[in-house]
Amino acid sequence: MQFPQRIGPDRVVAFIQIGSAPGTQAHQGVAITKDKDGFNVHSVWLADAEIGRWEAQNGRYGVTWQRALDAMVDRAATSPPP
């Protein structure tokens, strides 16, 4: 399975896949990145499988690890089932 290595300039430190069922966009998920201000939570999807390019929509910036993890779990839990 492919997963994002980086979101922008920041390295992905956690990723969870939340959908790739028929009729949905493949390889959707939630990623946590780390920068100098803390952890950031992103909704992500694979935009180009050939080059491994991921697109991201950001939600939370500069939060603690626990808040980032809680946000990741919340986003995964509220996503429509595949």
Image: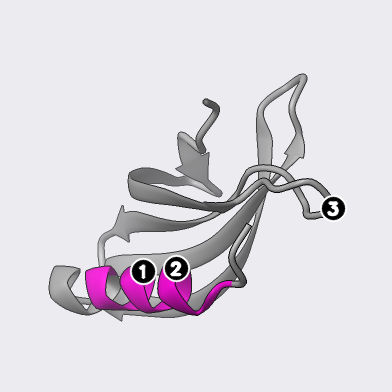
> Residue 72 in magenta?
yes
Mark in front: 2 vs 3: 3
Residue at far top of view: 50
> Residue 80 in magenta?
no
In space, the residues marked 2 and 3 are separated at their CA atoms by 18 Å
Q: Badge 1 is on which residue?
A: 72
Q: How many marks?
A: 3
Residue type at numbered disc 3? Gly
In space, the residues marked 2 and 1 are separated at their CA atoms by 6 Å
Element on which disc 3 rests = loop
Q: Residue at x 70, y 48 (%)?
A: 21
Q: Residue at x 66, y 27 (%)?
A: 52
Asked if marks 2 and 1 touch (Cβ < 8 Å), the reply is yes
Q: Residue at x 77, y 19 (%)?
A: 50
Local crowd size for mark 3, using a 10 Å CA cut-off: few (<14), some (14–19), many (≥20) = few
Residue type at numbered disc 2? Ala
Above or below for 38 versus 59? above
Q: Position of residue 5 (x, y in %)?
A: 46, 34
Report the magenta residues as a range: 69-79
Number of the label disc, if any, that sits on residue 54: none
In space, the residues marked 1 and 3 are separated at their CA atoms by 23 Å
Rendering colour mode: one colour
Q: Badge 2 is on which residue?
A: 76
Residue type at numbered disc 1? Met
Between 35 and 52, the residue placed more toward the observer is 52
Mark in front: 1 vs 3: 3
Above or below for 80 versus 55? below
